[in-house]
Image: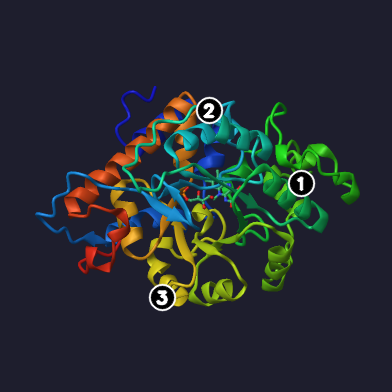
């Protein structure tokens, strides 16, 4: 299935053929008329590269550090909910791929496999030879937990505790989702999770405290007046009143570093630094929340300047090829994360397809770095961006 795929777009095409409409539309869609979804992708073509020649690029290194942990690639896995819709192994297969490539994976609160099982998978499968020369730092797989802050503080506290004791290394708090964006296809399809799947991390939480039945919590029900289960779950569970003051509470409640996901302005980037966050992810949720939010690559520079090196800045949204990664890193991101390509890969024979997705991305990144005359991914900077973009 994945044997003929040579780029991520090939996986997308395969995935559409394999998945049913309910699942495909859930993964593909963006908010409203999907301007931001499209812009995330098209805006990359505004930036061109300034390659340097004769730099001796026989050995190119992708190794980098994220909050002090050394990983083998600056391309990580964004949190994507309900991965078992793409393949029964879902997040377990994703963790196995992460383990084997010594990368960084962010597990969603809304995963179909629970955070403890995913951590075990991230640690237990065989590791690939991790070649280092004397004195060189070894790479290791990194797993972070993405948190949706719940209406009920004790639920949030329990999730934070579980993530810490299971061995997660950071908590990624998603701040762009006080309520769920309007995704038209999910409403048309009355999207809900099939009965055999569940939102596993929420299983052990006592939702009867909030008067909620398990079928709502597990996204098996849609609103009585029509629509998708996502609206119903989010309106019952997500804390719509979250403010910057709550980040201080979260920081105190968490034994792990906090990363804020969903920053799109210099103002919020500065508040993030002030709040004590260890890093931010420039993200518009893959165009699924506010339509007409800017493309992430277009606001990256403004945010990097505002942060002024005080914390790490990462980016997601529309990363589909090696040169996209180069552009984001040259504009100041320390790493990037990919979302939808995870489920495209999973839909093609699970771990096998997903592994190939990341092999392709890493290989494209290495090749394009070499052609840019860059031997070490950490050397990318503004001098590699040409000022000749076309408008998209
Ligand atoms: C997401 N995203 C997301 N983000 C998050 O913080 N928690 C989540 O549970 C999810 N779930 C989710 C499901 C699906 C189907 C998609 C497509 C996205 C957003 C995700 O982490 C990331 O921000 C975007 O997917 C990045 O954009 P690309 O790579 O999909 O273009």
Image coordinates of residue 252 in percent, x first then y, are 72, 65
Label at residue 225: 1
Nearer the camera: disc 3 or disc 1: 3
**Colour pattern:** rainbow
| Residue picked out by circle 3 | 305
Q: Secondary structure at mark 2?
A: loop
Q: Nearer the viewer, residue 392 or 99?
A: 99
Nearer the camera: disc 2 or disc 3: 2
Image coordinates of residue 14 in percent, x first then y, are 40, 29
Tell which circle, 2 or 3, labels the residue nearer the N-terminal end: 2
Q: Residue at x 70, y 50 (%)?
A: 231
Q: Residue at x 39, y 62 (%)?
A: 297
| Residue picked out by circle 2 | 125
Q: Quadrant of the N terminus?
A: top left
Q: Secondary structure at mark 1?
A: loop
Q: Nearer the viewer, residue 321 or 29?
A: 321
Tell which circle, 1 or 2, labels the residue nearer the N-terminal end: 2
Image coordinates of residue 28 in percent, x first then y, are 50, 42
Circle 3 residues within 10 Å: few <14, some 14–19, many ≥20: few
Q: Residue at x 79, y 58 (%)?
A: 151
Q: Residue at x 55, y 61 (%)?
A: 262
Tell which circle, 3 or 1, labels the residue nearer the N-terminal end: 1
Q: Nearer the viewer, residue 390 or 261?
A: 261
Nearer the camera: disc 1 or disc 2: 2
């Amino acid at each position: 299935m994945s044997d003929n795929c040579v780029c991520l777009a090939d996986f997308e095409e395969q995935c559409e053929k394999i998945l049913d409409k309910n699942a495909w539309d859930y993964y593909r869609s963006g908010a409203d008329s999907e301007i931001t979804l499209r812009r995330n992708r098209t805006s990359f073509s505004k930036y061109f590269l300034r390659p340097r020649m004769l730099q001796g690029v026989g050995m190119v290194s992708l190794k980098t550090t994220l909050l002090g942990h050394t990983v083998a690639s600056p391309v990580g896995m964004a949190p994507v909910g309900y991965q078992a819709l793409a393949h029964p192994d879902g997040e377990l297969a994703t963790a196995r791929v992460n383990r084997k490539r010594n990368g960084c994976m962010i597990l969603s609160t809304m995963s179909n496999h629970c955070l403890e099982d995913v951590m075990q998978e991230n640690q237990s499968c065989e590791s690939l030879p991790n070649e280092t020369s004397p004195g060189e730092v070894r790479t290791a797989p990194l797993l972070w937990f993405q948190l949706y802050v719940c209406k009920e503080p004790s639920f949030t506290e329990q999730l934070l505790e579980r993530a810490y004791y299971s061995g997660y290394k950071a908590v990624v708090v998603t701040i762009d989702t006080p309520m769920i964006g309007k995704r038209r296809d999910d409403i048309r399809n009355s999207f809900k999770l099939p009965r055999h799947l569940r939102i596993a991390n929420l299983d052990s939480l006592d939702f009867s405290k909030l008067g909620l039945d398990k079928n709502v919590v597990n996204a098996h029900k849609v609103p009585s007046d029509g629509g998708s289960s996502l609206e119903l779950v989010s309106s019952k569970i997500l804390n719509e009143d979250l403010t910057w003051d709550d980040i201080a509470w979260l920081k105190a409640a968490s034994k792990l570093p906090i990363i804020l996901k969903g920053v799109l302005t210099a103002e919020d980037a500065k508040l993030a630094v002030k709040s004590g966050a260890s890093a931010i992810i420039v993200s518009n949720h893959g165009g699924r929340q506010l339509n007409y939010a800017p493309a992430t690559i277009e606001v990256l520079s403004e945010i990097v300047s505002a942060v002024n090196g005080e914390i790490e800045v990462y980016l997601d949204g529309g990363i589909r090829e090696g040169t996209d990664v180069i552009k984001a890193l040259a504009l100041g991101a320390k790493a990037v994360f990919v979302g939808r390509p995870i489920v495209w890969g999973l839909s093609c024979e699970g771990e096998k397809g997903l592994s190939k997705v990341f092999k392709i991305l890493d290989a494209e990144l290495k090749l394009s770095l070499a052609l840019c005359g860059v031997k070490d991914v950490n050397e990318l900077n503004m001098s590699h961006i040409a000022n000749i973009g076309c408008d998209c």
